[in-house]
Structure formats: C-alpha cells, structure tokens
Image (spheres, grey):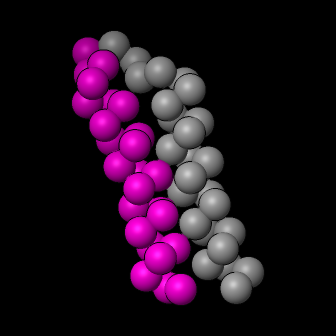
Amino acid sequence: MYYIVKFIQAAGLSIILIGFLQKFPALMSPKVFLLGVGIFMLGWLINRYS
C-alpha cells in the first residue's frame, strides 16, 4: 500500500510539473493545477489514514 500511495502522490506532482512546463512563460492552467493537487492529496489522505 505504501508504494501505491507514493506513486499516486508522484503522479499528482508530475501533473503539476507537466502543466507548468507546457505553459512556461505564462501561468499554468488552474484546472491542471487543481487536478494535480487533488491527486496528490488523495494519495496523502490514503497514506495518512490507512
């Protein structure tokens, strides 16, 4: 379970990184940012309460 939630957290951070790099000179899309944060928080909550 530990490695699964760490993979979910890494996926969330990767989504944020990709969104940042795609629109680099400008700000990234808030939808992509919230998607990445949501996925990261899902992994964090599973890790915290399991």
**Magenta stretch containing residue 21, yes or no?**
yes
List x then y, in percent, for residue 25: 26, 15
- In the picture as drawn, the residue positioned furthest to the right comes out as 49
**Magenta stretch containing residue 47, yes or no?**
no
List x then y, in percent, for residue 34: 59, 36
- In the picture as drawn, the residue positioned furthest to the top comes out as 26
List x then y, in percent, for residue 8: 48, 64
28 left or right of 47? left
Residue drawn 47% across and 21% down?
29
Figure quadrant of residue 35: top right
48 left or right of 25? right
Residue drawn 61% across and 78% down?
47
**Count of marks placed on residues:** 0
Quarter holding the C terminus is bottom right
Q: Main secondary structure of the magenta part?
A: helix
Figure quadrant of residue 20: top left
26 left or right of 2? left
Residue drawn 31% across and 37% down?
18
**Magenta region, residue range:** 1-25
Residue drawn 30% across and 19% down?
23
Q: Is residue 27 above or below residue 7?
A: above
37 left or right of 11? right
